[in-house]
Amino acid sequence: MNVDLYERIWLWAAAGIIVVFLVSMGVTTFGYAVRPPSHVEMIDPTQVMTDPSFGPLGASTRPDGSVRVAMAALMFTFVPAEVHVPVGRPVTFRISSLDVSHGFDIAGTNANTMVLPGYVSQFTYTFQRPGEYLVVCNEYCGLGHHTMQGKIVVEAAP
Ligand SMILES: [Cu+2]
C-alpha cells in the first residue's frame, strides 16, 4: 500500500498527539493525584444552612480530633467567608451550593472541586505551611463571579 508522504506525516503527528495526551493523563493521575471525586452525597439546597448532617458551617474539631470545614457557596460568596484551620492536620472540606454551580479552588494548592446544588462536595487536604490561602470560585456563576472569594487561615500549631 502506497501512502503519500504528507499523509504519513499527518498520521504520525496525530498518533504523537494521542500519546502526549495519554502520558499527560497518566502523569496528572498518578503524579499529581488529580482524579474525579468519589464522594457522592446529596442534600436539599434549601437545607444547606440548617441541615445538621451537613454543618455546622465553619471549622469544627470532631471528637476523634479530625478537623471538618463545612461551607456553603452562593452567588457571590462563601459562607463563612473565612475559616481558621490548623497546619499539618488533615482537614475535610464539605461544600454545597444554595443556587447554581460554583467552584472551590484553594489557590496555591491542588485542592479544587466543583460545587453543585443538591450535592455535597467533599475532600480532605492537609496544609503543610501556615498562612492565608485565597479561595476562588472557578466556575462562572453569574455577573459577580469575579468577586466570589473566601479565605482560609492556616494557623501554626501552638
Ligand atoms: Cu463563580
Image: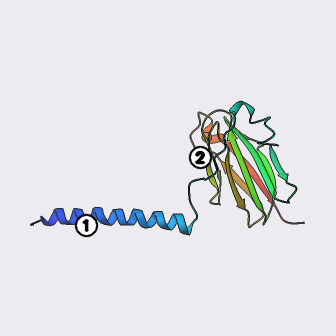
**The C terminus - image quarter:** bottom right
Relative to 17, is 56 on the left or the right?
A: right
Q: Nearer the viewer, residue 142 or 66?
A: 66
Tell me: residue 7, above or below residue 150.
Answer: below
Residue 16 percent coordinates (x, y): 32, 66
* Figure quarter occupied by ligand 1: top right
Q: How many marks?
A: 2
Q: Quadrant of residue 1?
A: bottom left
Q: Who comes first in sequence, dot 2 or dot 1?
A: 1
Q: Nearer the viewer, residue 89 or 131?
A: 89
Secondary structure, mark 1, is helix
Name the residue beneath numbered marker 2. 138
Q: Residue at x 80, y 50 (%)?
A: 83
Q: Residue at x 62, y 60 (%)?
A: 110
Label 1 crowd (10 A; few <14 / some 14-19 / many >=20)? few
Using the image, tell me which numbered label, if any, was put on residue 12.
1
Discs 2, 1 touching: Cβ within 8 Å: no
